[in-house]
Image: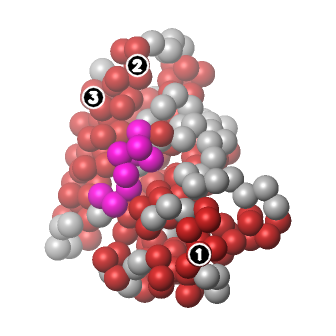
């Protein structure tokens, strides 16, 4: 689940002309399309370039390798989720921290279900450590939403201790969500996710 708000996508060089920006966008869309159709190990830069309608050389002007493209897709999804949920969750009325946390987890699961390309990356452990690290910084990713709620609604102050707790919660949440999706039935997945919400609520709010 975890660049700070407004962080650039991890590209080799930022496009300064409209044509370059269009190439980057085409590459990212192509990668997402392929991730929805193929196993990740069958997605490579040659296939991505062909799907995007650009040359491999044009792709490499902006992305050094496949991992950089995967990270860019993942970071964009994580930022889209954070922005979308900030409008919904932080303007909502919640009676408690556990209630907010439960809705945040539910929203993240809904997002994963609606975006199979991101689900393949997030649950398969295919996001690099650098990209994942960027999403655990203050203000970024789901941790940023939790931090904002705890500060605005619960009066919790920023601190190194809060940073660590949120990072621990995100790391635990990522692993347990992947575990939930690995279960053979929807009912078993639901039980694990409900237990995850209870576990994280006790850790963060008790």
Q: Is residue 101 visible?
A: no
Q: Looking at the image, is 124 positioned above or below residue 87?
A: below
Kindly check if marks 3 and 2 are in contact, taking CB atoms under 8 A apart as contact. no
The picture quadrant where one finds residue 140 is: top right
Q: Secondary structure at mark 3?
A: helix
**Pointer 2: residues within 10 angstroms few (<14), some, or many (20+)?**
some
Q: Earlier in the sequence, mark 2 or mark 1?
A: 1
Viewer-proximal residue among 191 and 160: 160
Task: Report the mark closest to the observer, 2 or 1.
Answer: 1
Asked if residue 127 lies in the magenta stretch, the reply is: yes
Q: Secondary structure at mark 1?
A: helix
Quarter of the figure with the C terminus? top left
Task: Report the mark closest to the observer, 3 or 2.
Answer: 2
Q: Looking at the image, is 25 positioned above or below residue 97?
A: below
Q: Is residue 17 visible?
A: yes
Residue position for label 3: 202
Number of callouts = 3
Could you tell me which residue is drawn at 51 percent across and 80 percent down? 48
Magenta span covers which residues?
125-133
Could you tell me which residue is drawn at 42 percent across and 62 percent down? 67
Q: Looking at the image, is 111 positioned above or below residue 49?
A: above
Could you tell me which residue is drawn at 46 percent across and 71 percent down? 117
Residue 148 horizontal/vertical position (percent)? 56, 28
Residue 99 horizontal/vertical position (percent)? 43, 38
The picture quadrant where one finds residue 3 is: top right
Residue position for label 2: 162
Q: Earlier in the sequence, mark 3 or mark 2?
A: 2
Residue position for label 1: 57
Could you tell me which residue is drawn at 56 percent across and 86 percent down? 51
């Amino acid at each position: 689940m975890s660049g700070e708000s407004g962080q650039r996508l991890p590209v080799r060089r930022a496009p300064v002309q409209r044509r370059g920006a269009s190439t980057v966008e085409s590459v990212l869309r192509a990668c997402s399309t392929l991730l929805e159709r193929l196993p990740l190990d069958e997605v490579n830069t040659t296939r991505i370039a062909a799907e995007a309608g650009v040359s491999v050389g044009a792709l490499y002007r902006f992305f050094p390798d496949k991992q950089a493209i995967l990270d860019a897709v993942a970071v964009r999804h994580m930022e889209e989720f954070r922005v979308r949920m900030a409008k919904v969750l932080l303007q909502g009325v919640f009676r408690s921290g556990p209630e907010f946390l439960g809705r945040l987890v539910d929203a993240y699961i809904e997002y994963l279900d609606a975006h199979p390309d991101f689900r393949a990356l997030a649950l398969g452990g295919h996001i690099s450590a650098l990209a994942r690290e960027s999403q655990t910084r203050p203000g970024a990713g789901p941790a940023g939403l939790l931090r904002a709620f705890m500060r605005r609604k619960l009066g919790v102050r920023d601190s190194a201790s809060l940073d660590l707790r949120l990072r621990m919660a995100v790391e635990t949440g990522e692993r347990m969500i992947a575990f939930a999706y690995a279960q053979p039935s929807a009912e078993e997945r639901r039980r694990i996710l409900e237990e995850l919400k209870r576990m994280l609520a006790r850790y963060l709010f008790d």
